[in-house]
Amino acid sequence: MIWKWLGALLLFPVQMVYLVVKAAVCLVLPPKLRDLSRENVLVTGGGRGIGRHLAREFARRGARKIILWGRTEKCLKETTEEIRMMGTECHYFICDVGNREEVYRQAKAVREKVGDITILVNNAAVVHGKSLMDSDDDALLKSQHINTLGQFWTTKAFLPRMLELQNGHIVCLNSVLALSAIPGAIDYCTSKASSFAFMESLTLGLLDCPGVNATTVLPFHTSTEMFQGMRIRFPSLFPPLKPETVARRTVEAVQLNQAFLLLPWTMHVLVILKSILPQAALEEIHKFSGSYTCMNTFKGRT
């Protein structure tokens, strides 16, 4: 028993070096992208914003079918027609992912009408955009139900069949605010931090499940209607991401089977700084960058 333990202990650093070298080589060599031609992709919140761009990107890269979920039929119809014009089969269903019964009911309808979902993209999200004391209780609950619990329901609805088929991918459009919260968006930051923990646990839990994987994307502020009015102090230094860029990099991460993706790459520096700097220094960074007051001009969707 002791020799087995010692062997594992000696092998562990060798494995770590091998994995680091492998990752470095993959950064240099042209990557082999996963073929999407047999995949049925469901995008929650697919009618507008990043969700619409994700639907376009999956269609552009050859996905077999695109299924859109959302709460606003007008937006869903427009996106569906656009995807069909691209030559890809597309369907939409009215579904509030924060409603557990509705999720399970519509998941059954999708399977009956369209077929099995092999790529689930949890993109739907809302933001209240107020401090805790100024927040409405129902609005706080809504953000937790949609941003966090909704992923529990959608994943439970589609993951079992993915495991049976040994073919599936769970994708979460999260936010860098899951790792570095800001004032004025306490509901959003809390829900995204919970969502990140959910995906981290799920990703590890899928290690022994052949053919089924997960990807979590953590983008910086993205220029969509949802965060309309948000202001960064140095927009030239920290420009907001374009939704089409987030969509493109997300689909690439799925095709590369990348577990976690921070956008842009400079956000890795933020994670490192949070690990080594004292709280007082981090507070000064927030004040200097303007993230401390960036939600003061927040308007959100009109």
Image (cartoon, helix red, strand yellow):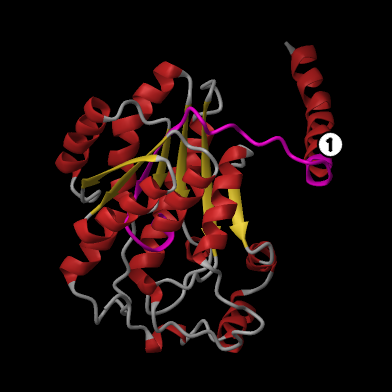
**In the rendered image, the vertical position of residue 266 relative to residue 288, given as above or below:** above
291 to the left or right of 142: right
Q: Which residues are magenta?
A: 25-51
User: Is residue 108 or residue 262 the one in the foreground?
Assistant: 108
Quarter containing the C terminus: bottom left
User: Is residue 37 or residue 265 the one in the foreground?
Assistant: 37
From the top left corner, tell me how far across and down residue 233 is, in percent.
Answer: 56, 89
Could you say whether the residue bearing mark 1 is in a helix, strand or loop?
helix
The residue at the point 24 percent across, 66 percent down is 140
Q: Quadrant of residue 274?
A: bottom right
The tally of labels here is 1
From the top left corner, tell me how far across and down residue 112 is, in percent.
Answer: 22, 26
Residue type (three-letter) at the residue carrying disc 1: Val
**In the rendered image, the vertical position of residue 292 relative to residue 181, given as above or below:** below
The residue at the point 25 percent across, 48 percent down is 97
Residue 262 appears in view: yes
User: Is residue 229 or residue 141 the one in the foreground?
Assistant: 229
From the top left corner, tell me how far across and down residue 188 is, in percent.
Answer: 36, 66
**In the rendered image, the vertical position of residue 229 relative to residue 19, given as above or below:** below
Q: Is residue 200 magenta?
A: no
User: Is residue 123 or residue 260 the one in the foreground?
Assistant: 123
Q: Which residue is mark 1?
A: 17
The residue at the point 25 percent across, 54 percent down is 77
Quarter containing the N terminus: top right
